[in-house]
Amino acid sequence: MVLKRTASLILGGLALVAGLAPAAWAQVPGVTDTEIKIGMFSPLSGPLAAYGTDPLNAAKSYFEMINDEGGINGRKIVYQVEDDKCTPAEANTIVRKYINDGVFLLLGGSCSGSTVSIQELVNQEKIPHFMLNASGDAGVYPPTEYQFGSAPGTQRATLAAVMQYAIDGLGAKTVGVLGPDDAMGTSALEMIYAMAKKHDIQVVANEIIPNNATDVTVPVLNVQSANPDVIILTTYAPPTTLVMKKVVEFGLLDTPIISAIQGVSNTVDFVKSLDGDTSGLGNFYYAHPLVAESMDDPELKPWKDLMVKYFPERPEPGIIGAYGFPHAMAIVDAIKRAGPDLTRESFMAAINETQVETKVMAAPTVFTPDRRDSNRGQIIVKFDGTTVERVGGPYIWDELIDPSTFDK
């Protein structure tokens, strides 16, 4: 009788201890009493690797700094890294792997198509996903619960700024557009037409240039024949280079050209891609979401130094690298506010009340339950091949045009 009662007490005590296990960490994917596991991905190979390497290093360097400072509530951030090659198939495979591995959240994606392709999966699995530096409009408009973006700004933010400067700064009455017909290009074009309609501006040409284009002669000639006041590029860096070479070849030197942010990943590399010929850059501008125009400017130099500290093999990270900081900062901020009993539910409650002045971006990083588009501001800079000069902004897209314009 005594033995049975003692056994019963022991079993009851074990059940009580199990019931009081701190935050039931065994049931929280990616969280232990010492670690928080994050799954990261970006293009690390192929023609778009420039859009992934430095932003990924920025995020990792921020996490490493936090770890060196003691972590968050006694936990260090550990991360896995995969190469999604900017393809939907790779992105989906990687995310499924991370889900099976039991990561707490996801931080990754430098290309809109691959990033948006995982939206259904992350919402189904209820795993928070933060875009690394993709624009990803279709992933945040309309908003869903578990997908967050975009750190450098959506195409709505970018092209609203581009159009506003074309109108106010360059006096444009007509514009011609060169860009891809993928998710990013479609979102960019949507804002171009919305701003054109609001300001009675005519889009006189819209020519498609795929991301893998090797010859842009015909689309550039078609835009030239339309004789727009301003040419707008929504292309990635490789086709942007092809266009700018044709600008020189065809003598389009007097027509102002404004590129979206993805067109110039690094000014040094951009000039190199032009074989050092800057003669076509006399009237060249691009949208820019950061507080400064160069990683060596005083505002951004501390962040460059942080990247180089942890990744000395990249002593001159490109300006696009800074885009990797904001969502790493927002993630850390929300984990801190979620408290020591970290769960996805407590994290989501915290992230939904996010407003972080990153000191990296021109506008704050903001998340609310009904907004997932993070950075909403851009500036416009002029680049002549040597000097980068701020000429307009910051422009906040939803202050320039009514967001309901895009509600269908």
Image (cartoon, rainbow, N blue to C red):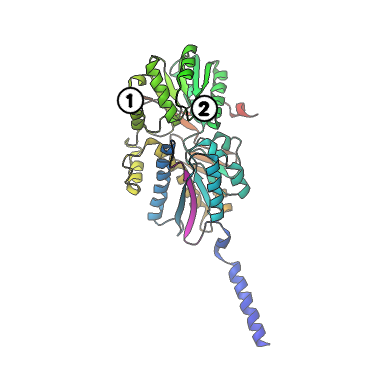
What span is colored magenta in the figure? 32-44
Q: Which residue is located at x 33 percent, y 31 percent?
A: 268
Q: Determine which residue is flagged by label 2.
A: 180
Q: Residue furthest bottom?
A: 1
Quick check: is 53 in the magenta stretch?
Answer: no
Q: Which residue carries the number 1 mark?
A: 385
Q: Is residue 385 left or right of residue 138?
A: left
Q: Identify which residue, 381 or 354, lies in the foreground.
A: 381
Q: Quadrant of residue 54?
A: top left
161 to 313, vertically: above or below: above
Residue 367 position, x and y percent, is: 54, 41
Residue drawn 55% across the image and 32% down it: 183
Please give the name of the residue rendered at 40% of the width and 30% of the height, measured from the top-left corner.
264
Badge 1 amino acid: Gly
Please provide percent x and percent y for residue 184. 53, 31
SS type, badge 2? loop
